[in-house]
Amino acid sequence: MVYDGMMNRLGHLTNRPATAWAAGLWLVLGLAACEPFWGTPEARARDFIEALVTAPAETQPLRDIAHLPPEQSPEALIDDLSARVGLDFLRARQAQGVSLKFVQGEARPVDDTHRAVVIHVTYLQPGTPVTGEVRFLVRLEKDDQARWRIARVTGDN
């Protein structure tokens, strides 16, 4: 039997090209499996709410996530009092050092160009093992370039 592989440091025979090819194949398959989750409207909604809570002063990244024109303020997308109160509450919690967790929830397709996504923001109640939650309903629509943009944010009661 002729073997044209190489020996590793432990003295075992190894076939490096085949090993590298197999590792590369697993990497490509893993990335291909994750690809549908990149850039989804649900992820855009979650990222927007997270940035709106954690870095509200940085308007350019918020505009980029929401696909807003330069003249439009991201804060203008907050459409009702419950969303405004929820944002202020979560910003205060974060300032107090409370850890926040942003999770995308139910996605409600309205039609091919409109979608609504529930974003759950959970936090640990101080001094207890109980978690609290604030929910937002983020409405998205496709723009003229077929990109998902944030249209408005309301509280999800």
Image (cartoon, rainbow, N blue to C red):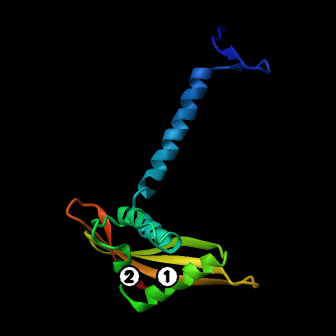
Position of 143 with respect to 107 (left or right) is: left
Position of 83 with respect to 2 (left or right) is: left
Residue at disc 1, secondary structure: helix
Residue 157: x and y in percent read: 46, 90
Q: Which residue is rendered at x = 52% and y = 45% of the image?
A: 30
Is residue 18 shown above or below 39?
above
Give the mark, 1 or 2, whose residue is nearer the N terminus.
2
Residue 12, quarter of picture: top right
**Outermost residue, top side:** 2
Which amino acid is tagged 2?
A: Ile
Does any portion of residue 49 appear in the rendered image? yes
Residue at disc 2, secondary structure: loop
Q: Nearer the viewer, residue 11 or 90?
A: 90
How many residues crowd around disc 2 within 10 Å: few (fewer than 14), some, or many (20 or more)? some
Does any portion of residue 156 appear in the rendered image? no
Position of 147 with respect to 126 (left or right) is: left
How many residues crowd around disc 1 within 10 Å: few (fewer than 14), some, or many (20 or more)? many
Residue 40: x and y in percent read: 39, 61
Mark count: 2
Q: Which residue is rendered at x = 43% and y = 69% of the image?
A: 48
Q: Which residue is mark 1?
A: 87
Q: Which residue is mark 2?
A: 78
Residue 85: x and y in percent read: 49, 88
Which amino acid is tagged 1?
A: Leu
Spatial CA distance of label 1 from label 2 is: 9 Å
- Are the residues tagged 1 and 2 within 8 Å (C-beta)? yes
